[in-house]
Image (cartoon, rainbow, N blue to C red):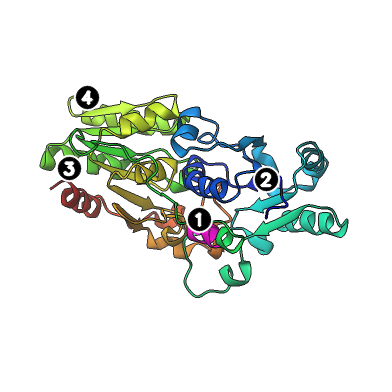
Amino acid sequence: MSHHSNAWFVNFSGIGNGIIIAPILKCFEVSYPFVAYYHTENQVLADPWFVEKAQLKNLKGFSPKVWRRFGKEKWEEIDSFIKEKNIDLIVNLRNEGPKYDTEYYQFKERIMSKKTRVDFWDLDFEIIEHRTKHQNLTGDIIALLETKGVNISGYNSKWLALSNYKNKCTGVGFGMAASQSNKRWTTAKWTALTHQVIKDLNQRVVLFSGKSEDELKEASHILHNIGREKCELMNILFLKDVALHMGEICCFVSNDTGLLHMASAMNIPTIGLYISTDSDIWSPHDKINFIAVQNNLTKKCPNPKPHCGNCFHYYDVCPAIIKYGDNIEPSRIFDEIKRIIF
């Protein structure tokens, strides 16, 4: 690795992916302090507050997120980027693999056929695609980097943990946000859980909504039904402020989304609701203070992408969700919250 000077990490672009990769990038920096690197654009990694928390020094910039799929119409732009930034190492952290990430592998073959000085690090899909039980993506990323000489001994998944947290926490947070509607628990179930937490546990509930019109409408509907005395809507523009407000709560319940990974990295007791994704693959690597609750009806999806932990309908409407919904009930989540708080 010592012969590389500029690396490009190709990754998913979500907030959760930024939370996951930040402490791993720190390990990369410690092992190879003279390698500058770029990353797929990411809201977390672009925020100075998070970069300082992760102690990242060698992150030099970002690539457009649309490049992560290596669409052929973008190859000329990507070629120019590689040349301009003197990229000599491309690290692909996406778990699509040769089966689904076809244009990336075509791009890789094209570059390698030119006998350029660009090397490629990929996840091991000979293992990932054929193992009988799916495993955590973060674990696969760590395993890849370890084979390339990155020392992971300093890896800290709780890199956002707050000091004096337990002495000042109060209330329960609900992470209703999710970029895709398939990943969101129903408003009716959030409402039922909110009622029960307020009535039976005497806890205030803080709703962390997404920014889209639909997400804001869902959260506002709950607030209207519950009332503002014990329920509040947290709709904050800046990611740093989301983290600081999240640090005031005692328990966090969330869809599979960036807020879930943020809460886990802060070491807040977190319950993850996996409505349309596979918790074995997408839950935090460190399960301390984390409980994953899986919707088992996703197995009925007619178009799964098993080793990816989702399906071909990730960006539209999953037929299984439409027909069967989810089998995660508010009563079960309430019991988990009660155990955490008391």
Write the residue at 47% across / 32% down. 52
Q: Position of residue 54 (x, y in %)?
A: 46, 39
Q: Are marks 3 and 1 in contact (CB under 8 Å)?
A: no
Q: Amino acid at mark 2?
A: Trp
Alpha carbon distance from label 2 to label 3: 47 Å
Q: Which residue is mark 2?
A: 8
Q: Earlier in the sequence, mark 4 or mark 2?
A: 2
Q: Which residue is mark 4?
A: 228
What secondary structure is marked by label 1?
A: helix
Q: Amino acid at mark 4?
A: Arg
Q: Residues within 10 Å of mark 4 (few under 14, many from 20)?
A: few
Q: Are marks 2 and 3 in contact (CB under 8 Å)?
A: no
Q: Amino acid at mark 3?
A: Gln
Q: Earlier in the sequence, mark 1 or mark 4?
A: 4
Q: Are marks 4 and 3 in contact (CB under 8 Å)?
A: no
Q: Which residues are magenta?
A: 137-143
